[in-house]
Amino acid sequence: MTLKIISAQEILFNGEVSSVSLPGSMGEFTVLHNHATLLATLEAGKVTYTDASGSTGEARISGGIADIDNNIVSVCVY
């Protein structure tokens, strides 16, 4: 699954991951391979992910929107 975390100024992350946890406005949620299509608003917090090699990473955000479709997770942040 591909994760893209972008802001107006830069690309924070773009790569293959096995899971992503996002700070949704209705609570934290995790996206795995073949997740259903979803559009969600995000609150301030951290996006955590596990890449294909098993390493974890995170990005702090102040809010945004996540679009999950066809194993592509696009996160547009403020």
Image: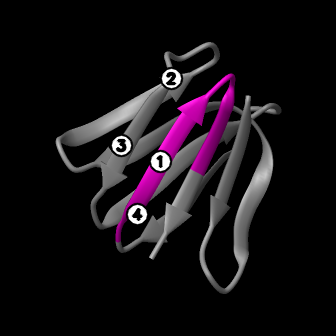
Residues tagged 3 and 1 counted as in contact (Cβ below 8 A): yes
> Residue 53: where, in percent of width, then height?
82, 33
- Label 1 and label 4: CA atoms lie apart by 7 Å
Residue at 69% over, 44% down: 3
Residue denoted by label 2: 37
| Marks 1,4: beta carbons within 8 A | yes
Quickly name the residue at label 1: 66
Dot 3: within a 10 Å radius of its alpha carbon, few (fewer than 14), some, or many (20 or more) residues? some
Q: Residue at x 33, y 63 (%)?
A: 45
Report the magenta stretch's main SS.
strand
Disc nearer the start of the sequence (2/1): 2
Q: Earlier in the sequence, mark 2 or mark 4?
A: 2
Amino acid type shown at disc 2: Thr
In the drawing, what numbered circle is on residue 64? 4
Is any atom of residue 55 visible in this view? no
Q: Does 17 sit above or below residue 75?
A: above
Local secondary structure at mark 1: strand
Secondary structure, mark 3, is strand
- Which residue carries the number 3 mark? 40
- Give percent across and percent down for residue 78: 44, 76
Give left or right: position of 51 versus 39.
Answer: right
- The answer to which of marks 3 and 1 sits earlier in the sequence is 3
Q: Which residues are magenta?
A: 63-74
Q: Is residue 73 magenta?
A: yes
Mark 2 residue element: loop
Quarter where residue 51 is shown: top right
Which corner quadrant of the image does residue 63 belong to?
Answer: bottom left
User: Is 7 rendered above or below residue 20?
Assistant: below
The span from disc 3 to disc 1 (Cα, nearest Å) is: 5 Å
**What kind of element bears circle 4?**
strand
